[in-house]
Every structure is written in C-alpha cells, then in structure tokens.
Amino acid sequence: MKILMIYCDYFAYKPTIKNLDWAKEETESKNYENVQVAFIQIESHDSEDLSGSVKKLVNFVKWVARKNTCEKVILHSFAHLSESKAEPEITKEIFDLSEIKLENGGYETTQTPFGYFLDLDLKAPGFSMARVFKSF
C-alpha cells in the first residue's frame, strides 16, 4: 500500500469518465475546505490480510490528520503510486472498511467516486505535515 496524504485548504472533484462498469453512477461535483486527502494505492499484497491493511491505513490517516488538527478526511483511490495493483473489488472493500473505522473514530470521512477519472481542484498550503508519503 502506498499513501500520499495532502492537507488541503480546498479540495474539489468532478466525475468525468467512468472506468469500471460496476461502479455506482456518479455525476455530482463536490468541494471541501480544510480537509485531509489520502491518495491511496492498494497493492496486490494488501489483499493477503484485509484487516491488517485496513488497520495500517486507518492508523496512518488518523496520525497525519491529528498532526494537522483536521477531523475531515477524504479517501481517494490513486492507482499511480506503484506498479502493483490490487483487484478493484479488494481496493473498494478496504476503502469501505476504512471509512467505517475512521467515522467510528470521530472523523468526518468520505470517498471520491470509485471507478471514475476525476477532474481535481485543490489548494494545498506549504508546511511540513501538509504532504506526507508512506509505503507499507
């Protein structure tokens, strides 16, 4: 698993191209302020231990969000951080389980539309914990 965390003063997306037939239909654009965005690549080895993968993801996201005193989190599938990719169904399952755990931990959590290419617009400030990368 690879995770690039970017704290954003502003983050917005618009679904443009659906690239998974089974993905839920999404057309609505959304925007957020003061949010921790997790750009996540689930790799093939992460499917060997789903609960362990979820735990690592959630713990890291919470750690970075706490450092930035941020209680809003967006999980974004970003399959460009590694050549290794898990099956899309596994990735979606890890995202869904992670969202539940983050919400149970007091974080307002959402996901960008899964299975879509998105137009992104973001404004990210330049301080030390605004951008953090982790590889598991």
Image (tube, rainbow, N blue to C red):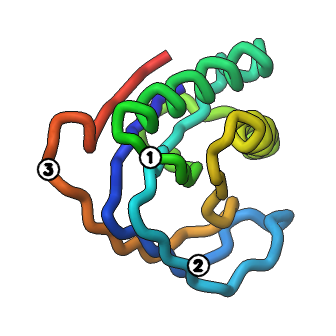
Residue 76 seen in the current view: no
Q: Position of residue 102 (x, y in %)?
A: 68, 38
Image quadrant where one finds the N terminus: top right
Q: Residue at x 44, y 57 (%)?
A: 35
Whichever of callouts 2 and 3 sits on the residue coming sooner in the sequence is 2
Mark 2: few/some/many CA within 10 Å (<14, 14-19, 20+)? many
45 over 105 or under it: above or below: above
Q: Amino acid at mark 3?
A: Gly
Residue 18 seen in the current view: yes
Name the residue beneath numbered marker 2. Answer: 15
Q: Is residue 96 left or right of residue 106?
A: right
Q: Position of residue 103 (x, y in %)?
A: 73, 44
**The image quarter in which residue 52 lies:** top right
Name the residue beneath numbered marker 3. Answer: 126
Q: Marks 2 and 3: which is nearer the front?
A: 3
Q: Residue at x 40, y 41 (%)?
A: 69
Q: Position of residue 95 (x, y in %)?
A: 71, 42
Depth check: give the residue in front, 96 or 84: 96
Q: Residue at x 46, y 26 (%)?
A: 63
Residue 70, disc: 1
Q: Amino acid at mark 2?
A: Pro
Secondary structure of residue under mark 2 = strand
Q: Measure the alpha-carbon separation of dots 2 and 3.
A: 27 Å
Secondary structure of residue under mark 3 = loop
Q: Is residue 113 left or right of residue 36?
A: right
Whichever of callouts 3 and 1 sits on the residue coming sooner in the sequence is 1
Q: Measure the alpha-carbon separation of dots 3 and 1.
A: 16 Å
